[in-house]
Image (cartoon, rainbow, N blue to C red):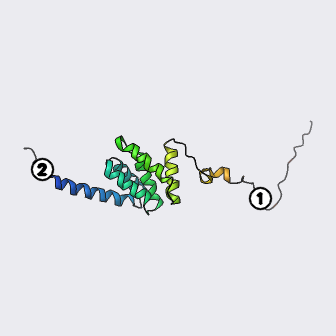
Amino acid sequence: MESERKKISGQEKDEASIRLLEKLQDQLNSHDASNRRRAAFNLSWMQEDGLEILKGALFGDFHVTAKNAAAYGLRKMRGRMRKMALEAIEQGLKCRDGSTREVCRNALQLLGQKVNGGAASRPRAARSSRIKEIPKKGRPRRSFSIRRTHR
């Protein structure tokens, strides 16, 4: 005997997809990094709806970890939404929020694109001074001389 499957109507599909999108949006703000990343990846497969949620998280008033996950989802967009996702990341470079700008700059660098930026884009090592060796406190270091005796 074959198991009977219930036919799903169009309205039930819409309600189920809305619940799924809400669940993924909540997971995008999760404390667990793995859940955030997985939700962003799943949203990247959802075309228009996923793009809107990811853009909302990137440009909205969210924590930087959620913005990083949204940028990850935008980087993973495939197909016809890829160009729009890249435009959204590039638009983030012009955003007033510093965390959004930094997340978008990092996302574009990970995609292999050159990002022209000001002082904020320079590597930290170039800005910091050299690390100096601090001498140990206590007795001064002895220098040993080896005496060789002839036999």
Q: Quadrant of residue 55?
A: bottom left
Q: Give residue 7's mark.
A: 2
Residue at left offset 40%, top offset 52%: 37
Residue at left offset 16%, top offset 52%: 10
How far is the residue under mark 2 from the one under mark 1?
A: 77 Å
Dot 1 alpha-carbon crowd within 10 angstroms: few under 14, some 14 to 19, many 20 or more:
few
Q: Quadrant of the N terminus?
A: top left
The answer to whether one can see residue 14 in this image is yes
Q: Quadrant of the C terminus?
A: top right
User: Going from the N terminus, do you reach mark 2 or mark 1 first?
Assistant: 2
Q: Quadrant of residue 81?
A: top left
Front residue of this view, candidates 14 and 66: 14
Circle 2/circle 1 CB separation < 8 Å: no
Q: Please, what is the three-letter code of the amino acid marked with disc 2?
A: Lys
Residue 100: horizontal and vertical position, in percent?
49, 57
Front residue of this view, candidates 103 and 117: 117
Front residue of this view, candidates 26 and 99: 99
The answer to whether one can see residue 66 in this image is no
Q: Please, what is the three-letter code of the amino acid marked with disc 1?
A: Lys
Q: Give residue 136's mark.
A: 1
Residue at left offset 48%, top offset 53%: 92
Left or right: 109 in relation to 17: right
